[in-house]
């Protein structure tokens, strides 16, 4: 596949980057801990058109490539609030695209039981539930009282519901699969952005921090760490952009395979780069005042959204085995 962003997509990426630099500056990230998204930020995202990027059929949504480049920027700047689920829900929930309604979401596999952790629930108006055979919408007022929950990522508040009631059906199995597929691509994009952010922090520190009279970035061991971080980001970015293109136009390949590969590589890049940033910063790297732990914790959260790297690796392995055992010339 020959893939290149067009001028409109590049303009959208640059506009999102400018907004993030202004509204989501990383030097003030501590002030956003355990707080809902700022109304000014949310209004700005709506005015930029972020929440209305997706349209058309869930199986092949228009705007998924544009959404991918935007969510990479949001991931790099550690966006707060339910931006991902709101964007997914905008085509089927009124009031989301203009920023008036915030949507939290959860994907519940068949047979799952027990408490359900849901991110950003307290600041959301609607809960979107993806089940295996349908999509449901639940009003916030119809949900049971939440149990206390401690967030893994200080920028991602969590509420725990004892159970999720049956909501109003707004889509069938095809819509659920399509939303899950697009959500996987956008979560991969946020992981790519976070992996890039971790690399930027580690690289900046390595160029400034001196030891024995020279920047530590001149040491071969640190160079290798940074080079590995760079390779992980570029591999994950290429796979994620390719997955977005295939989801937008399934004639270009198998969307499920492309999406699984993207989430696998992006998940590994996000977590590994977060850990490596902590290592490069040394004794300060694991402290609360430094940025690496934010990128690492966000990567852990996104890694478990829409399937872990291990789950997607297993799905890809099963598909390869199926193809290898299929009769010659048989189609999948």
Image (cartoon, helix red, strand yellow):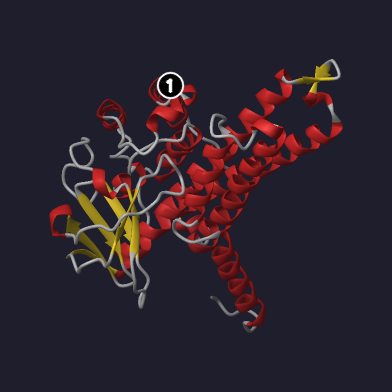
> On the rendered structure, is 200 left or right of 98?
right
Kind of element beneath mark 1 = helix
The picture places residue 110, in percent across and down from the top left corner, at 35, 75
- What residue is drawn where x is 44% and y is 32%? 9
Q: Name the residue nearer the viewer: 117 or 74.
A: 117
Q: Name the residue nearer the viewer: 271 or 95.
A: 271
**Residue count near mark 1 (Cα–Cα under 10 Å), binned few <14, some 14–19, many ≥20:** few
Q: Name the residue nearer the viewer: 226 or 65.
A: 226
- What residue is drawn where x is 22% and y is 63%? 136
The picture places residue 182, in percent across and down from the top left corner, at 40, 53
- Per the image, the residue denoted by label 1 is 18
The picture places residue 18, in percent across and down from the top left corner, at 43, 21
The answer to whether any part of residue 226 appears in the image is: yes
Image quadrant assignment for residue 116 = bottom left
Q: Name the residue nearer the viewer: 49 or 79.
A: 79
- What residue is drawn where x is 41% and y is 49%? 151
- What residue is drawn where x is 68% and y is 41%? 276
The picture places residue 55, in percent across and down from the top left corner, at 29, 47
């Amino acid at each position: 596949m020959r893939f290149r962003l067009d001028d409109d997509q590049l303009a959208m990426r640059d506009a999102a980057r400018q907004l993030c630099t202004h509204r989501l500056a990383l030097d003030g990230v501590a002030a956003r801990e355990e707080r809902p998204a700022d109304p000014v930020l949310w209004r700005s995202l709506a005015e930029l058109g972020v929440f209305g990027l997706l349209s058309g059929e869930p199986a092949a949504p228009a705007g998924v490539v544009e959404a991918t480049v935007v969510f990479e920027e949001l991931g790099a700047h550690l966006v707060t609030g339910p931006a991902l689920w709101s964007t997914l829900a905008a085509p089927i929930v009124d009031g989301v695209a203009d920023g008036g309604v915030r949507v939290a979401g959860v994907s519940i596999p068949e047979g799952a039981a027990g408490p359900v952790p849901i991110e950003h629930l307290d600041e959301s108006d609607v809960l979107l539930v993806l089940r295996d055979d349908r999509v449901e919408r639940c009003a916030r007022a119809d949900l049971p009282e939440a149990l206390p929950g401690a967030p893994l990522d200080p920028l991602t508040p969590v509420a725990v519901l004892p159970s999720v009631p049956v909501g109003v059906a707004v889509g069938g199995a095809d819509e659920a699969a399509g939303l899950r597929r697009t959500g996987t691509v956008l979560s991969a994009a946020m992981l790519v952005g976070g992996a890039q952010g971790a690399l930027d922090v580690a690289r900046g520190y390595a160029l400034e921090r001196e030891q024995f009279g020279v920047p530590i970035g001149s040491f071969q061991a640190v160079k290798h760490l940074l080079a590995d971080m760079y390779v992980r980001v570029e591999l994950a970015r290429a796979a994620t952009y390719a997955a977005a293109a295939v989801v937008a136009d399934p004639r270009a390949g198998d969307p499920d395979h492309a999406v699984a590969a993207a989430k696998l590589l992006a998940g590994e890049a996000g977590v590994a780069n977060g850990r490596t940033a902590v290592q490069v910063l040394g004794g300060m790297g694991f402290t609360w005042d430094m940025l690496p732990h934010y990128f690492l914790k966000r990567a852990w959260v996104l890694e478990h959204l829409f399937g872990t790297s291990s789950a997607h690796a297993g799905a890809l392995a099963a598909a390869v085995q199926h193809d290898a055992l299929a009769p010659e010339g048989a189609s999948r």
